[in-house]
Amino acid sequence: MAKLREKIGYALGDAAAGGITWKVMSIAFPLFFTNVFGLTFADAATLMLIARMFDVVTDPLMGSLADRTLSRWGTYRPWLIFGAVPLGIVFALLLYTPDFGTTSKRIWAYTLYLLMMVAYTAVNVPYGSLLGVMTDDDNEKNQFSSFRMVGAYAMGFVTLLSFPYLQKMVGGTDQHQYAVVGACLGLMATLMTLACGLLTKERLKPVRAEKFSLKPFADLFSNRPWIILTCIGISMNFFNGFRYAVAGYLFEYCLKGDVTVNGFIINYTVFMTFGELTCMVFGGLSPKFTQWMGSKRKAFRWATTVCLLFSLGFFFIPMNPTYIWLMVALVVLTSVGVGLFSPLLWSMYADVADYATEKNGTSSTGLIFSSGTMAQKFGTAISGSLVALFLGLAGASMLTDDLGNTMVDPASITNSVLTMVWSLFSLFPAAIALLIILLTYAYPIKK
């Protein structure tokens, strides 16, 4: 029976990865790259698209490599212990804007973004795989998964709520603010990842294949639960990815900047913080909700239905700062569903890993969990890439000033662009939620 300290230690892993690095990459990077760093919409879209194609290869390879790791620290923990520092350093550098020309800045952004994906993969794939070797008790897996989501959302709440105030405290240019805040958050991510590696235990030994083989990769495509769950995972991250990637543009263009209510600053990070807090609370309630519903599959379906209804409702809110609290209310209600289904995904991956071990005779836990990480990065970043693409198609364009700096042309932000932004936050996620509901009916494991 795992102690509370270990569950908190496991939660710190996703507090670093999901609550700091990935949260900032999801919500701040699209706006940062176009409005602060100076990439064009096309460059930003291409950057995130290339990175996702890169992950299609690196994530499964990392999973297979992690499965075969032998060390005094175990199979998966050493990747957290020794990957913590590179993760924090690369993250901090990615939020730094060098004083380079357009081409050199593009090279910097592409190189650092790809390095960030490597560092994130090297830490997060083994981190997810830990769930498969810490316990063989299904209820305890749900508890670990719930702690993980609470850690991610709690830290996401702190990160997003504090972001505008940290920027204001740092002062100076936008570039300087992002660089200093990035360094601070990178240090925190390093310390939390290291703590996770040191506080957790590997109690189960994977049934290893005798030598490296491509067979585990081929076996995945005959594993029906894995195929369907991966589609659900990608869709789930498309749902979240659209909302987070477009939130900055929603405030910048639709609401004409930050909204101040009685001295309280509501910008795009604070706006999404209300959802993070809700996800944290309902992520903790997810195991009880699942028991009440009778199965993970049914619980996932009903939680996603909540997301569908309130995402759809957001589209009909007037595009006016006066309605900010109604917008917040819809974000909170949507996040009830997100909080309930998020822990279930990783617990279901553990079920799929157990299914694969029984079917094939050897463990492919790391490989299977790597597909969950790949789905997370693929769905989030492709949605971020599509946001930039759709805004460009709606008419948003860039201009270059006398000093060669690239920025968004204010004259290009027409009503069609505003409608596109509003739809990307509401209608697009609603359609994806409907797809997830249909996929849950096809998922065959009924735990």
Image (tube, rainbow, N blue to C red):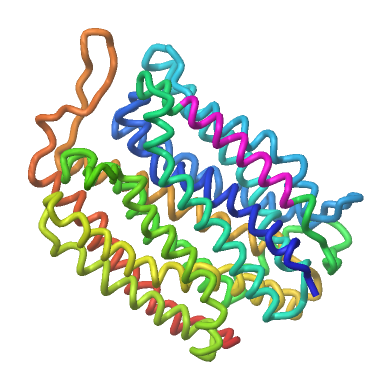
Between residue 238 and residue 25, name the one nearer to us.
25
Residue 195 part of the magenta segment: yes
Residue 314 part of the magenta segment: no
Residue 253, image x and y in percent? 18, 40
Between residue 45 and residue 414, name the one nearer to us.
414
Between residue 177 and residue 413, name the one nearer to us.
177
Q: Is residue 176 visible?
A: yes
Quarter of the rendering containing residue 258: top left
- Above or below 260: residue 435: below
Image side of residue 349 versus residue 404, left or right: right
Residue at 25% of width from left, 54% of height from top? Answer: 424
Q: Is residue 352 visible?
A: no
Residue 274, image x and y in percent? 36, 57
Quadrant of the rendering where the C terminus is positioned: bottom right
- Above or below 31: residue 348: below
Q: Which residues are magenta?
A: 179-196
Kindly give the residue lying farthest to the top in the view shown.
Answer: 403
Task: Tally the numbered discs.
Answer: 0
Residue at 40% of width from left, 82% of height from top? Answer: 302
Residue at 70% of width from left, 66% of height from top? Answer: 131
Kindly give the residue lying farthest to the front in the view shown.
Answer: 262
Quarter of the rendering containing residue 191: top right
- Above or below 112: residue 430: below
Residue 185, image x and y in percent? 55, 37
Between residue 306 and residue 124, name the one nearer to us.
306
- Above or below 346: residue 301: below
Quarter of the rendering containing residue 360: bottom right
Q: Main secondary structure of the magenta part?
A: helix
Image side of residue 350 versus residue 203, left or right: left
Residue at 47% of width from left, 71% of height from top? Answer: 282
Quadrant of the rendering where the N terminus is positioned: bottom right
